[in-house]
Image (cartoon, grey):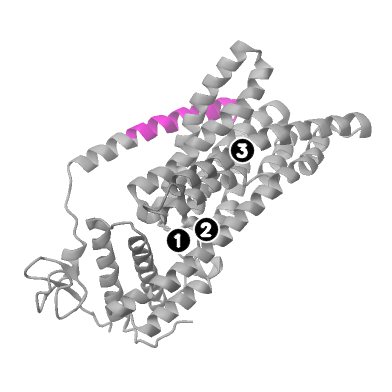
Amino acid sequence: MVATVASPVQQCARCGLIQPPANFCRRCGNPDPFPISSERYWGEHSSVGRPIAYSILTLIFAVMLGCVILVLLSATGLHARSIAIAVGAAILPTIAYGALIAWLDRAEPESWELRILTFLWGAVVAVFIALILNSTAYSIFALLTDADTGAILTAVTSAPLVEESAKGLLVLLVLWIARRNIDSMLDGLVLGATVGLGFAMTENIMYFGTAYRDGGAEAVGALFVIRCLINGMGHAVWTSFTGAAVGWSRGRHGRGVLRFIVPVLGWATAVAGHAIWNLGATIVIGIMNIVLIETYQFSEWRAFVVAGVMGGLPFVIPTVLTASIFARLGREQEDRIIRTYLPIEVRLGTLTPFEADRVIGQHSHRPTLRSLRRKNRSVRERRQAAFDAAAVRLAFFHYHALRGERPDKATVQRAEQMRWRIATLRSASDLQPRDIIH
């Protein structure tokens, strides 16, 4: 028989504040708040405008998705085998690189809803914007010069500017609309990498479909080596620079002009890295390809693969190493924030000193991706993980507030919700102050 535990939620009779158990109101000081059920706390007021806005956005997204699908089908020549090979070759590396990105943010992962929306922005919205603007730029360049020169100018100038702007726009929108999802440089980096990964998947489907239509499976294999193995993280890495810069600026609220300059520099770095690959790698790989064919009698696709590996890696390795350094700095920043600001909740009485030390230790010794995916974790372990996540959210709440970002009413209510959640989880799980889950 499983015992039920009442949710420890109280409401002030004077001001209506809902809070964890206490003998006084945190807002107005009124004594003896009365208990209420947790269902009342979780209730949300309905809004007429919100469903209408969601319907309009869904319709716009559906139109964009339809246009992108038509372009992809046109690239594959409407052949079933071409579509299957192109989609399969694009999705498999996306899954692998997506797991790597999730591993970077394994200690404090964002919600799956945000991850999916971010990925879809890159795979559909950013691609739609890029198709329109890049096609327009190509038409102008081709009209002023010729078709080949127009293609080169589009790849070197328009594509990096348009694509990195379209992808980076999502990071700015999240900062504007749901800024609580970007707490540090690491959060911004992961967000940018996710939107870049979605963009790369759609772009790869288009390139692989065209390659199979024109050159068969051998052409797809050679292109797969270049686009997925050598530079498979290209779009993700470039946009991660924008995201990391935006995440860094989040902690500089009202603190000088650097909070505006650094995001621009991050975006400029992403554009430069993209342009250098499109121009430099293409030239080097093209020259090496010609040399291997004419001098060493390599076959066309074998020469392309060898030239891609030898000519592409020098352009890929520096950007990947730079992104790795940013990720490491972001992890260290998060650890430092939690160590510094979580003790505030100890002084407020939300956590015991032992609980705070355990949360800090858990965050420093980050769990592996395998342990996070373990399906047979006990209910007690899952509640402990939720307890730790709520405590970490409170540490970031104090970090932003004490660095000059005045919290609005919704942010304060979410902080109170996290305190209530901690109290509820402690009560429901019967967690004692010195309980440790290994």
Q: Locate residue 266, reporting x and y percent.
A: 53, 45
As drawn, is 21 to the left or to the right of 247?
left
Question: Does residue 72 belong to the magenta stretch?
Answer: yes
Q: Locate residue 426, reporting x and y percent.
A: 31, 79
Magenta: main secondary structure:
helix
Question: Residue placed at 23% from the left, 79% from the top?
Answer: 4
How far apart, in angstroms, are the residues tagged by discs 2 and 1?
Answer: 7 Å
Question: Does residue 75 belong to the magenta stretch?
Answer: yes
**For the residue labelled by badge 2, is the local secondary structure a helix, a strand or a loop?**
helix
**For the residue labelled by badge 3, is the local secondary structure a helix, a strand or a loop?**
helix
Q: What mark, if any, has residue 109 been given in the picture?
A: 1
- Tell me which numbered mark, 3 or 1, is placed earlier along the sequence: 1
Question: Residue placed at 43% from the left, 42% from the top?
Answer: 170
**For the residue labelled by badge 1, is the local secondary structure a helix, a strand or a loop?**
loop
Three-letter residue code for mark 3? Ala
Name the residue carrying label 3: 272
Name the residue carrying label 2: 102
Estimate how packed mark 2 is, as few (under 14), some (14 to 19) or many (20 or more) residues with alpha carbons within 10 Å. Answer: some
As drawn, is 234 to the left or to the right of 32?
right
Stretch in magenta: 59-80
Question: Residue placed at 58% from the left, 61% from the top?
Answer: 328
Three-letter residue code for mark 1? Pro
Could you tell me if residue 428 is visible in this image?
A: no
Question: Residue placed at 39% from the left, 55% from the top?
Answer: 181
Vertical position of residue 21 compared to residue 155: above or below: below
Q: Quadrant of residue 344?
A: bottom left
